[in-house]
Image: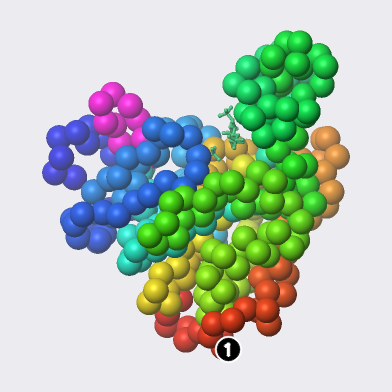
Amino acid sequence: MQNSAWKKSHGTSPILSMTPKKPQQWLQVVGHAGSFHVGEYGTLLKKFCKGEQECYLKLMEDPMRPFVPVYYGVVQRDEQDYNMMDNLLTSFNTPAIMDCKIGSRTYLEEELQLARERPQPRKDMYEKMVAVDPEAPTVQEHTQQAVLKTRYMQWRETLSSTTTLGFRIEGFKKPNEECHTNFKRTKSRQQVMEALSDFVESNTQTVWGYLRRLKQLRQVLESSEFFRTHEVVGSSLLFVHDHSGRTGVWMIDFGKTVALPPNLTVDHRTSWVEGNREDGYLWGLDNLIDILTDMLPLLKHGEGPPIPAQICE
Ligand SMILES: Nc1ncnc2c1ncn2[C@@H]1O[C@H](COP(=O)(O)OP(=O)(O)OP(=O)(O)O)[C@@H](O)[C@H]1O
Ligand SMILES: O=P(O)(O)O[C@@H]1[C@H](O)[C@H](O)[C@@H](OP(=O)(O)O)[C@H](OP(=O)(O)O)[C@H]1O
């Protein structure tokens, strides 16, 4: 913490044991522009969100900890607060990176309630909708040239695989290629499989690595107190692999993960009806694991499971 730009840090772990200072590679696949800065010592700074901080603090004490970026606390830069966490790309060499949004619902129940009480139709979302499908807005929405956020999010869910499979590919970046983010209409199992095969370049070793990690994650989630007691919405799995055969998957983005009332728990597989707070996270993870498993015999390169030491955990 030599840099004077670091005004404060009240983290959960010392940074001294972290990766030595060296030029850091980082690339944002999707998400809000301008929210991130690359930090020192292999860290990443994300614009402060109190709810996300609360999640990370709890996650550092939960069995889920190995499956999320290590969280170091809050720092300030140019009068803006940031949550500081591990840059998950640090230990990879020119990696391929994919962001998959998990769950069958991408807006919180509280957002739905708010939209009913104080509807705020959005012009930017109308424009994003029309750009993909000019026929999608209703007559009233066309007249207003605006749509409610929850309506936009529901439309995105049904257009993509979120509603039918409980996850969707948001985007990926392969070495020496531009980011691919054109997945808004990637909906069927077949389309998803094709996109995933493209991401892994038909390499079965990579798929084996991802499967092993995803199954470990599922096991941990099924026993996690944090997971049982939180509505997890809009969170992604970040997939990373490189040519050395290393693979890694982590949960990121807890900006819309909220604690349930004390008397309520979720199993993340039961279908959502308003009030039960279910988010379909494990249902989506089950489907993702099934699809990757079904892909294995269809892929060209590599055979058999990878050497465990090559897996990044
Ligand atoms: N810890 C991390 N290490 C490496 N890359 C990260 C990390 N966290 C986020 N990213 C990159 O930033 C992108 C956006 O992350 P994130 O989902 O947290 O942002 P967001 O603005 O909250 O997204 P959304 O638009 O879904 O709300 C990810 O797709 C990934 O490329
Ligand atoms: O991917 P798209 O089609 O561009 O749509 C955005 C995406 O759904 C983000 O997840 C969402 O942010 P949150 O998850 O944080 O709600 C954002 O809402 P926003 O514009 O209100 O930030 C949407 O605009």
Name the one closer to the observer, 304 or 145. Answer: 145
Q: Between residues 61 and 146, which one lies in front from this camera angle?
A: 146
Mark 1, Cα crowd under 10 Å, few <14 / some 14-19 / many 20+, is few
- For the N terminus, the quadrant is top left
Can residue 135 be seen from the camera position used here? yes
Q: Where is residue 122 in the image (x, y as percent from the top left)?
A: 64, 18
Quarter of the C terminus within the rendering: bottom left
Name which residue lies at 85% across and 39% down. Answer: 273
Q: In which quarter of the image is residue 35?
A: top left
- Does residue 59 appear anywhere in the picture? no
Residue located beneath label 1 in the image: 304
Q: Residue at x 19, y 33 (%)?
A: 5
The residue drawn where x is 78% and y is 47% is 163
Q: Position of residue 104 (x, y in %)?
A: 74, 47
Region of the chain picked out in magenta, as a range: 75-83
* In this picture, residue 214 sits left or right of residue 262: left
Task: Give the camera-side residue of 191 and 288.
Answer: 191
Residue 298 location (% of width, % of height): 68, 79
Horizontal arrangement in the rendering, residue 29 relative to residue 169 (left or right): left
